[in-house]
Image (spheres, coloured by chain):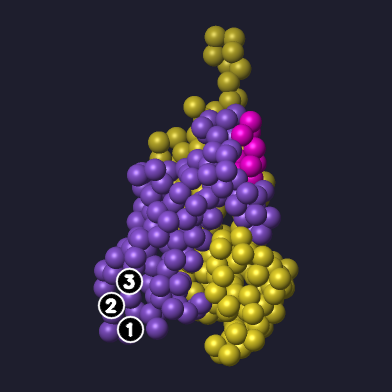
Chain colours: A purple, B yellow
Amino acid sequence: MEPQRFRVTRADLVRYAGASGDFNPIHWNDRFAREVGLPGVIAHGMLTMALVGRAVTHWAGAPDAVVEYGVRFTRPVVVPDDDDGTVIEVSAVVKEVTGEGLTRLDITATCGGEKILAQARAVVRKS
Amino acid sequence: MPVTRGRVAGTMYFRRMPLDPSFVGRSYPPTAPYLVGREKIREFAAAIGALDAAHHDPEAARAAGYPDVVAPPTFPIVVTMAASRQIVEDPALGIDYSRVVHGDQRFSYTRPVVAGDELVCVNTVDEITTRGGHDFVTTRTEVRTAGGEPVVTAWSRLVVRGEG
């Protein structure tokens, strides 16, 4: 899978909060985020997982291609309060193609050169 | 939140008790059905920039063999996160939600969620461990249609951060 870049701004966090129903203030309120020891507002882990899932789904070629998908969130993605936001970079390598036609992917996601996910894996039925 | 209470040199202190591992294996009653709306799928897909026609256009979805617009793979979190509040807010278990961080997330799909699905969740506590002063709770949410057809299973590992 070709590496892909996803820009994430505060507006994206607001949109994701509304669409997902996750209104945890660490994703929109700097004051609250700092009170709980974060450097500032951070992206929803599930937004990162969704962006990676979008990249994998698109690569696999069908909306129902993903059979298994899991990640560990290892580092928060801080999203500054400006027009540029931050950038998440996603890449994946094929680890195995099984006899049943399933493809196992090992996924890497970084932000500012630091890994933000561990054990990020998907099993897809590539069309 | 279960706490022990004591007094050291005149100062009251509270120490959080580890979560009770006897909750492992406990299942909760099925949730009320969640009716998946076409506009909700479109809204979610737009929020993550998933612009493929199958997520937005019912005709394109039907042409590709689906009954209606197809949800992106992480869409089930909309349903499962709300459903798993049964566990997170169970006063008998006593998770302090203000200290919860999402550790891991995994999905295993039987088929994608499509608009029109009525989804019922059954939550189970899969694992509770305590390490380094933090509690780790893995919840498993089995998502089926109201008719009992399996759709997706979601596992969430929550980290309940210890104090300090």
The magenta region covers A24-32
> Picture coordinates of residue A17 (x, y %)?
65, 52
> Picture coordinates of residue B140 (x, y %)?
53, 62
Q: Are marks 1 and 2 on the same chain?
A: yes
Q: Please give the name of the residue rendered at 58% of the width and 21% of the height, measured from the top-left corner.
A: B13
> Picture coordinates of residue A29 (x, y %)?
64, 37
Q: Is residue B35 above or below residue A10?
A: below
Q: Please give the name of the residue rendered at 67% of the width and 77% of the height, measured from the top-left corner.
A: B115
Q: Please give the name of the residue rendered at 33% of the width and 83% of the height, measured from the top-left corner.
A: A101
Q: Residues within 10 Å of mark 1 (few under 14, many from 20)?
A: few
Mark 2 sits on what residue?
A97
- Horizontal side, residue B162 vs residue B67: left or right: left
Mark 3 sits on what residue?
A104
Q: Quadrant of residue B147?
A: bottom right
Mark 1 sits on what residue?
A101
Q: Are marks 3 and 2 in contact (CB under 8 Å)?
A: yes
Q: Is residue B56 magenta?
A: no
Q: Is residue A17 above or below residue A25?
A: below
Identity of the residue furthest to the front in this view:
A83
- Horizontal side, residue A71 vs residue B57: left or right: left
Q: Are marks 1 and 2 in contact (CB under 8 Å)?
A: yes
| Secondary structure of the residue carrying numbered label 1 | loop
Which chain is disc 1 placed on?
A
